[in-house]
């Protein structure tokens, strides 16, 4: 069965550039972003890892750990990290998982169960290993974004989605299209207008089913 939103993220033990981890233990009581890549030393992925390296403080401010997974060895990851740091001008402070066994890629439904790494493989052999997962403190999958190899991820969007997920975890709200921190939010339909006024103050009713409030602190 395919992995879905609100499923428990598969746990695993893996070797990483920061040593052996148990994934759920590593997440702890915060959020995690797991982002996967089909191969080290590839151009788009190098820019993506560089982008994450420069955003380390942004993720930390959101109580969120970031971990990369690439279908290569720890030694390859360490060598590749030098290129990433040269390109981005930032240290790679997050771990990168050795998934040369395809354990994580298969557990997270990125590759067929019978997939293997052929000799002399190219990135095309693992091209579908291009997914981003946001995982909550409850270890449930909150978001999945899947990208083709030719499209670099927008990590501003991933931060925006993370902000929305965390805001919704604190209050019965949703966020509208193109929302960003500080914008008005939508009152969940599970909350009556009267209860929303009592909880949040002023409520703007655009339609009975679309009511907005200023974002709670």
Image (tube, rainbow, N blue to C red):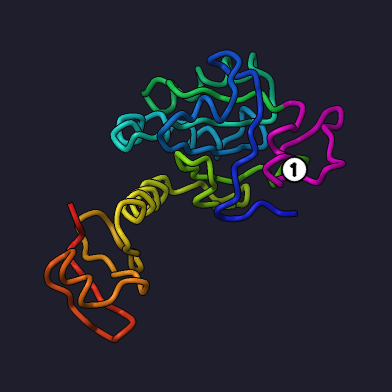
- Corner quadrant of residue 41: top right
Q: Quick one: 144 or 82, which is closer to the camera?
A: 144
Q: Quick one: 157 or 113, which is closer to the camera?
A: 113
Tell me: 60 left or right of 67. Answer: left
Please provide the residue range marked out in magenta. Answer: 100-123
* Within-10-Å neighbours for mark 1: few <14, some 14–19, many 20+: few
Tell me: 49 left or right of 114. Answer: left
| Quadrant that contains the N terminus | bottom right
Total marks in image: 1
- Corner quadrant of residue 99: top right
Q: Quick one: 160 or 43, which is closer to the camera?
A: 160
Point 49% across, 47% down: residue: 153
Q: Is residue 197 above or below residue 217?
A: below
Looking at the magenta stretch, what is its main secondary structure? loop
Point 61% across, 25% down: residue: 97
Location of residue 27 in the rendering, given as x and y in whole percent from the top left corner: 48, 30
Is label 1 in a helix, a strand or a loop?
A: helix
Q: Is residue 112 magenta?
A: yes
Point 20% across, 77% down: residue: 194
Which residue of the protein is positioned furthest toward the bottom in this rendering? 207
Q: Is residue 79 above or below residue 199?
A: above
Location of residue 50 in the rendering, given as x and y in whole percent from the top left corner: 44, 31
Q: Quick one: 171 or 90, which is closer to the camera?
A: 171
Location of residue 215 in the rendering, given as x and y in whole percent from the top left corner: 20, 60
Tell me: 48 left or right of 109. Answer: left
Location of residue 51 in the rendering, given as x and y in whole percent from the top left corner: 41, 36
Q: Is residue 44 magenta?
A: no
Pointer 1 residue = 124
Q: Is residue 110 above or below residue 209?
A: above
């Amino acid at each position: 069965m395919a992995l879905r939103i609100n499923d428990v993220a598969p746990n695993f033990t893996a070797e990483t550039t920061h040593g052996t981890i148990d994934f759920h233990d590593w997440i702890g009581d915060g959020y995690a972003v797991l982002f996967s890549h089909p191969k080290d030393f590839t151009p788009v992925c190098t820019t993506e890892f560089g982008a994450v390296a420069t955003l380390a403080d942004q993720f930390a401010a959101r109580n969120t750990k970031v971990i990369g997974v690439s279908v290569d060895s720890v030694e390859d990851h360490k060598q590749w990290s030098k290129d990433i740091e040269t390109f981005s001008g930032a240290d790679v402070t997050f771990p990168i998982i050795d998934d040369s066994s395809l354990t994580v890629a298969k557990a997270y439904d990125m590759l067929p169960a019978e997939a293997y790494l052929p000799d002399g493989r190219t990135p095309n052999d693992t091209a579908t290993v291009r997914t981003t997962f946001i995982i909550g403190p409850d270890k449930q999958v909150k978001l999945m974004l899947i990208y083709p190899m030719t499209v670099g991820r927008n990590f501003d969007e991933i931060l925006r989605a993370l902000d929305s997920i965390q805001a919704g975890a604190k209050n019965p709200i949703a966020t509208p299209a193109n929302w960003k921190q500080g914008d008005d939010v939508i009152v969940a339909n599970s909350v009556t207008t009267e209860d929303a006024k009592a909880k949040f103050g002023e409520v703007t009713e655009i339609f009975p089913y679309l009511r907005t409030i200023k974002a709670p602190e």
